[in-house]
Image (tube, grey):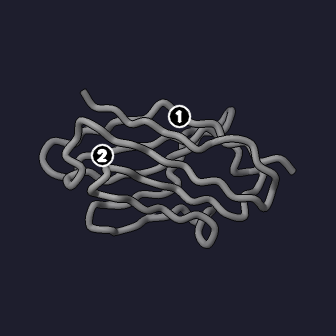
């Protein structure tokens, strides 16, 4: 059974930092790309950052220079370090695992609320 369990969200003031963690189980981590997406009320879910098992990173323009994505293949963990947070970063953040070899399969975490106060 595949599980993506997120942790680390919460309330922070503008300019502060938070670190999200995602623990994956039930997947062969090396053939998946890990990612973070977010969805604010009334908006569509949008990509924040992705990282492949080989370390290739893709960041949304809105978070470049402020957010960093990383992963630990041995621990099957993905992380999103969020610095210089802005109120517009407020959203539910979802961990994502996308299979990159063979049939495309996508898994989602349960979501984790991040609220940035001004």
Residue situated furthest front in the rendering: 75
The answer to whether 89 appears left or right of 103 in the picture is right
Residue 78, above or below 40:
below
Tell me the distance, in whole angstroms, between the alpha carbons under discs 1 and 2.
16 Å
Residue 109, above or below 18:
above
Local SS, label 2: strand
First in residue order: circle 1 vs circle 2: 2
Residue 65, above or below 15:
below
What x and y, as percent, mark residue 116? Answer: 76, 47
Residue situated furthest right in the rendering: 118
What x and y, as percent, mark residue 107? Answer: 34, 36
- Residue tagged 2: 98
Disc number at residue 111? 1
Q: Residues within 10 Å of mark 2 (few under 14, many from 20)?
A: some
x 72%, y 64%: residue: 84
Local SS, label 1: loop
Could you say which quadrant of the image residue 65 lies in? bottom right
What x and y, as percent, mark residue 41? Answer: 68, 33
Figure quadrant of the N terminus: top left
x 41%, y 57%: residue: 50
Disc number at residue 89? none
What x and y, as percent, mark residue 11? Answer: 74, 42
x 34%, y 32%: residue: 3
x 31%, y 52%: residue: 75
Q: Looking at the picture, tell me which residue is in the foreground, 93 or 13.
A: 13
């Amino acid at each position: 059974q595949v599980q993506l369990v997120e942790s680390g969200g919460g309330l922070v003031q503008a300019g502060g930092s938070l670190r999200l963690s995602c623990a994956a189980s039930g997947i062969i981590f090396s053939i998946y790309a890990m990612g973070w997406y977010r969805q604010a009320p009334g908006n569509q879910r949008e990509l924040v950052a992705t990282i492949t098992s080989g370390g290739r990173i893709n960041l949304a323009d809105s978070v470049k220079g402020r957010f960093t994505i990383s992963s630990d293949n041995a621990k099957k963990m993905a992380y999103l370090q969020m610095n210089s947070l802005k109120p517009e970063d407020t959203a539910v953040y979802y961990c994502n695992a996308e299979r990159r070899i063979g049939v495309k399969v996508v898994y989602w975490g349960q979501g984790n609320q991040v609220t940035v106060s001004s």
